[in-house]
Amino acid sequence: MTETTQELLARLAGFTPGPWGAVGQSVYSAHTSGPRAGQNRSSAYVDDPRTDCDELEATARLYAAAPDLHRIATEQAAEIARLRDQVNKIDRDRRLVEAQVDRLLALVNSMDDDYRSLQLAAESLGAMPEGYCFCSKDRIGDDSKTHEPECAELRAALQVQP
């Protein structure tokens, strides 16, 4: 089973605070305050002749970094959680916007259909987008300003493509 971030941070929370150091084959932390200040608090003794001083010093540096590593890991876990929440909110907002776009597209398509129905109805009565009107039989082809205002408006509307 994979350990969760919170489980890992809880497990790491019990570290022994530094400062840590290395002497010989021992890695230790000294008490920094109280009646035992300066005395060894905790130590790890390496009884392996293959372990050299460089490795002990590296181990001491790792132990010494534990409080900072824990703090950084805790901060990063909080930041990841905050970003995850933000991504989830953005995703919810995106889905809402997509739904609104779908509704608007349906409305536009409906308006296109309504416009085409109106255009067909007007054309069936004799109005044509090419400029002819039905305000009077003897005015067919006459583009003078003597047409009824509604005729000019209808002709202009029929020429507009949605």
Image (tube, rainbow, N blue to C red):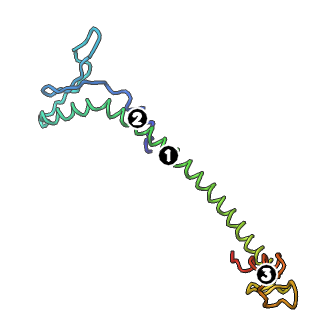
Tell me: residue 20, above or below residue 133.
Answer: above
Decide which of tag 3 and tag 2 comes sooner along the chain: 2
* Comparing labels 3 and 2, the label whose residue is closer to the camera: 3
Residue indicated by mark 3: 145
Cα–Cα gap, marks 2 and 1:
15 Å
Task: List x then y, in percent, for residue 17.
Answer: 30, 24
Tell me: residue 23, above or below residue 124.
Answer: above
Tell me: residue 63, above or below residue 146.
Answer: above
Residue appearing at x 79%, y 77% in the figure? 154
Cα–Cα gap, marks 3 and 2:
80 Å
Q: Amino acid at mark 2?
A: Thr
Please name whichever residue, 140 or 45, is drawn nearer the observer in this view of the structure: 140
Q: Quadrant of residue 23?
A: top left
Residue indicated by mark 1: 84
Q: Quadrant of residue 56?
A: top left
Residue appearing at x 32%, y 29% in the figure? 67
Task: List x then y, in percent, for residue 135.
Answer: 86, 83
Classify the position of the N terminus by image quarter: top left
Residue appearing at x 28%, y 13% in the figure? 33
Tell me if 97 is positioned left or right of 131 in this view.
left
Classify the position of the C terminus by image quarter: bottom right
Residue appearing at x 69%, y 77% in the figure? 161
Q: Amino acid at mark 1?
A: Arg
Tell me if 140 is positioned left or right of 74 in this view.
right
Cα–Cα gap, marks 3 and 1:
66 Å
Decide which of tag 3 and tag 1 comes sooner along the chain: 1
Please name whichever residue, 153 or 93, is drawn nearer the observer in this view of the structure: 153
Q: Secondary structure at mark 1?
A: helix
Residue indicated by mark 2: 74
Q: Secondary structure at mark 3?
A: loop
